[in-house]
Image (cartoon, rainbow, N blue to C red):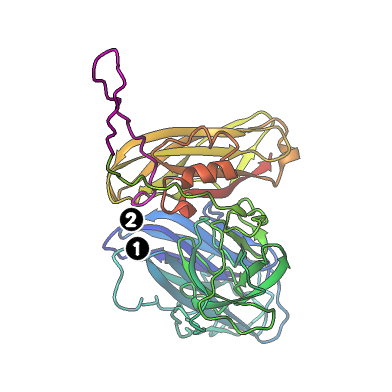
Amino acid sequence: PVQYTITLTNNGPDVARQFSVFDDLPHTGWFENPDLPECTITSGSWVLNCFFDSLAVGASITINVRTNDARPCQTVDLYNVATVSNGNVPGYQDSGRITSLCGTATPTTATPTATPCSGCTPTETPTATPPAPTPPASATVSASPTRTPSPCGLSCTASPSPTSTRTATPTASPGTGTVRMFTNNTGVIASDLHFWTTGPYQNVTPTVEQNAPGCSQPTAGASFVGSPDFTFRVSVVWPTNCVDPGESVTLRLGCGYTPAATPAPGCTVNVPNCVDWTTNGNQIGSPCPTPNCGGQPCCGGLPCPTPTATPTPSVPTATATVTPTPCGSCTPTATPTPNPNAAGHDARLTRIGGVPKNVRLLPGEVINDTATITFANQSTHGDSIGIYVDVIAPAAGGCTPNGRADAVIFTLIAAGAKTTEDVPVSYSCADPAAANGLSYTWVAVADHGGDDLASCGPGALQSLACFNALADDDQDPSDNRVSRNGPRVVAQ
């Protein structure tokens, strides 16, 4: 058996917030010991993903991963790299290596206390030093392998390996087409990005202008779906789960008039606000609808809302008439009705936090919990913001809640301020066995002005009607909504 100990330490000077850990584990059969609710290991690919809300200055978190899978008695090189990062940090790594001539070892304790043979003590690897400059809130990670030797007289050594630094890899591309940045706002580490494009072009060619920090170069392509909009499905696939929450990738979408044509100078395609992030092909949240725009610009798979014109002041023209009036000289006065104007108004739903990985339920049992909804006023002035939250229950098992969990309007949030709303929830299933392995889904919306509750009712937060209502007075409706899967029901 082999165990790796990953230690995360915040060296300051500020509290580290919303950071993640990624470790593509070598070999198979890994599990956490003990199990942390913030971490998961994907069976089959054996990838460790963790997401933590905060870590105080000077505090540490320890993650132990272990495998009992036996190795044949031959030379085996286990090389492991763990990475910690968040939206403000490019990513810090550390590594550990074990070389063994006999892979069948019986564990006694997590850390060896005796060495029955010469040269069997693994050497702890040094802590990686982050590149300068040091960010305001930073976290470092060290991966320290430990191995319990068996009394078979195996010869094992451990040696440190060079520490690598994650860097962004930009790719040059022709200066034509539409350039767009895509940010992973799902709260989950992703490996794939998918979205639709429409426009009067029979050739769409995506290229990576700026890769996500620390990720290997992805493959990008577009497949033709059909007319009349010349719809294409664009896919960007990374070799591993590496696009952390808050990280972005910038793409250039070149386009041409024939399928084999070179991208045309100055051409543009319509890119909807709805995009799909997936992990190893598994959908995160609800999928975007297939475009059906009839040649118009697409927003979320349907025609974009028509912008409302801003009223233009005009000089009234007086016309003299000789019509007697009961009051002698009465002049009616028209009162203009202002129309909404989206410029300068921007409410953003940043994150859904505090959702556990699993909820363990007996029939009829109620588990109380609290999630946090983080939102921001990105307007240039103080604004009111409405927060609407739905919790969607699994499709089986008679589970609750299943509908509106919160609806509150915050008045006069200061420009640039970020605010958190606590949402209490009670999880329960009449038949947990029927829902075993299925997950709840959280959906939250930030509404500039708090005036769209009627269009964004329970169960309608991902509807076109809600999107249009949010977009009519928000200059960037693409960041009004966040969805997140969890918790997963575990029947007891």
Q: Residue at 34% x, 63% y: name it.
A: 10
Confirm whether the magenta stretch covers residue 359: no
Q: Is residue 69 above or below residue 286?
A: below
Q: Earlier in the sequence, mark 1 or mark 2?
A: 1
Q: Is residue 376 above or below residue 366?
A: below
Identify which residue, 44 or 325, lies in the foreground.
Answer: 325
Q: Residue at 53% x, 72% y: name it.
A: 146
Instruction: Tell me whether the residue at label 1 lies in contact with that at label 2, contact meaning CB atoms closer than 8 angstroms.
Output: yes
Three-letter residue code for mark 1: Asn
Q: Residue at 60% x, 75% y: name it.
A: 149
- The image shows residue 452 at horizontal and vertical percentages of 47, 36
- The image shows residue 265 at horizontal and vertical percentages of 52, 81
Q: Is residue 440 left or right of 62 when viewed as pictured?
A: right
Three-letter residue code for mark 2: Ala
| Region in magenta | 317-345
Q: Check the image and name the residue furthest to the top.
A: 326
Identify which residue, 1 or 51, lies in the foreground.
Answer: 51
| Res. 1 visible in picture | no
Q: Which mark is residue 464?
A: none
Quickly name the residue at label 1.
10
Quickly name the residue at label 2.
56
Q: Is residue 225 left or right of 243 when viewed as pictured?
A: right
